[in-house]
Image (cartoon, rainbow, N blue to C red):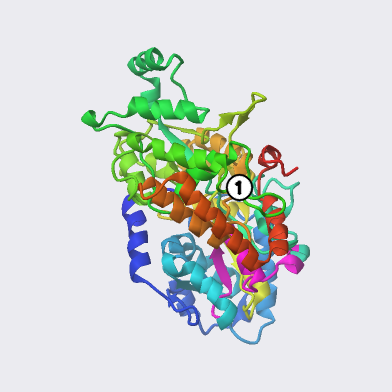
Amino acid sequence: MKKIVVIVLTSFLLLSMVACSNPSTPATEGSSSASASESASASVSGTDLDTPIVTEGLAYSLPQYPTKQESDAIIAARKIAAESKEPITLGILISPDNVADFEPFYEEWERETGIQLKTYTVAWGDWYRELTGLTVSQNNTYDVFMMCPQWVPDLATSNVLFSMNDFVSKYNPEIFDPSSDNSLLSGIDAFAQYDNNYYFMMSDTDVATLYLRKDWLEDEANKTAFKAKYGYDLAIPETLDQYEDQLEFFTNPDKGTYGAVMSWSSEETCFQFFPRMASQQVPFFNDDMSNNINSAAAVTALEEMKAELPYMMPGTLEFDAARAQEAFAQGNVYSTSIMTWAQGMFENPEISQVVGKVTYAPFPGRVNASGELVSPQCQFWGWGYSVSQYSNNPELAYLYCQWMSGAAMNARVSLTPGGWYDVAKKSDYDSTQFPELLKENGGNYMKDWMAVQTWQLDHMMPPVNAMRGGSEYGGVLVDAITAVLSGSTDAQTALDGVSQQWDDITDRYGRDEQIKAWKDAQQMYAPTVRQWLGFE
C-alpha cells in the first residue's frame, strides 16, 4: 500500500458501509478495460506466439520490464489461449479501493495474451465472508483473488484456495527462488506457503512503521529541555520507555500538540499490542497450544497502551487509518504508527504539512537481561494474489498471478496513483536496480524509509490471525483491547476472558490440529524473532 490521498482513504469506509454481497452470488461487477470490451468477440488464437512483448508506451512503464518471470507468464498464457476454442475471461476479485492497482494493466495483458479480464469487487466488510462462503457456494465466477497472507491458512484448509505447487514447479517463478534478486524480501518469503503448498504470491509488505517528526527531534531547544527533564539525549527512540518519555514531552494540549495519534478504533490496535507483548519474549501460544494471552507480559503490553492515552490526540480511539494519517499530516502531532503506504502521503505537498519533516523508525522494543534490544515488528495485511479452487482456468489464473507478482510489475503497480500496493521484492529495494522508485528520482519512496522497512522485515512477526482459526483468535482479542482502552474493564480481567475464549477456539478446531497450525505459523516469523520467542 502507498501514497493515498485522504479523500481516497476516507472513501474506503464509505464503500465498506454501502456495498455488500451474498457469499453465494457473484460480487459487484466492475468493468474490464475499454479495449477488452471492444475485442470481446476476437479470437484468442489471433495472438502471435512469437510477437515481442511490448515494452514502450505502457502505463507506468519501467525499463526493467519484463523480468523473466513476467515474460514466461505472458508466453505461456499465449500458448494456452491459442489452443482454446473459445474466448477466455478471467474474473479478478478486488477490493473496491484496489481497482487502481489492477485495471491500468488490463489492456496490455489482454493484448499480449488474448485473455480478457473482468473486475469484481466486494466491500471490505464483506470481503472475508465472500471468500469463506465459496466453501459452500463453490462459485466459479472468480479466478484470481486479491488476498492477504493471514487469510491463507483458513482458506486453504476450507478448500477455497488452489494449490500452486505444480505450476510453481513448472514455471519456477523468480519470487520463490532465493538465489534471484527478484525474489521476495526475506521476512515475508515464508508467507507464500502453508502446509507445504504454495497458495499466495505476495506483492506488498505492510509492516507498521513508526513515523516521527524529525524537525522536533532536531530542534535545539527541544534537545536542551528534554535532557534537562529526563537526563538523556533526545533521539529516535529504541526502547518503549524512551518512546513514552517522548510522548509525554511533546504533549501540550494548551498549544494543541500531542505525542501521538493512532488508528485505535479497530484491529489496528494490534500494531502496538503484538510487538509490546513479543518484546518480552513471550509468544501467543506454547507448544501444547496453552495460551499466554493473559500472562504478565500481555497485561503489561495492554496497560502500557492504556497509560499512553493521555498523550494521544483526542479522538484516537475513534480514528481509523485515514483520520489518523490526516491528523499527523496536519503537523501538530509528534508520532504515529501506520503501515507502509503512509510514507508517500506524508511526503505529498498537496495534502501534507509535514513534507521533509518526517523520519522513520522501527517500533521500539525492550532491552532484555542479556543486554539485547528485542524489537519485533508487526506485519498486518500485505496484499498479493491467489487462485480460486473453483476456477475453470487455474493455470491461466496462476500465470496472471505470476505476471502481476513479478518484480518489475510490482514496481509498476506501486506507481499507480491512488493504489495501495508497495514493492516487496529484493531488487525493488535496491536503488541500483530500481532507482526510479526513489522519491529523489520521481518515484514514491524515501531512501531512509526503505532502509528502515528492510530492517523491519528482517525482524518481522505476523499477527495471531496468520494461523488456522486466526480470524477468531484475533477478533476476540481486538474486542478486549478496545474494552480496556475505552475504560470498560481492566487489562487482567479482559485478557483472562480472552484466554478462556482462545482455549475454547482451540478445542473446537481440535488441539492436536492447532498444535500443527501453530508450528506452521511460526515459520512466518523472521528468524531473529523466532529465536527471541524460543521457536528455534
Front position in the image: 519 or 188: 519
Residue 436 in view (yes/no):
yes
Front position in the image: 411 or 398: 398
Q: Is residue 319 left or right of residue 256?
A: right
In percent of the image, x 39 and y 74: which residue is there? Answer: 20
Q: Residue 488: x percent and y percent?
A: 36, 50
* Residue 149 colored in magenta in the image: yes
Quadrant occupied by the C terminus: top right
Residue 420 in view (yes/no):
no
Front position in the image: 442 or 266: 266
In percent of the image, x 73 and y 62: which residue is there? Answer: 512
Question: At label 1, which amino acid type do we have?
Answer: Asn
Q: Please, what secondary structure does the residue beneath circle 1 have?
A: loop
Q: Start and end of the magenta stretch?
A: 139-168
Q: Residue 531: x percent and y percent?
A: 71, 39
Q: Which residue is mark 1?
A: 292
Q: Which image quarter: residue 257?
A: top left
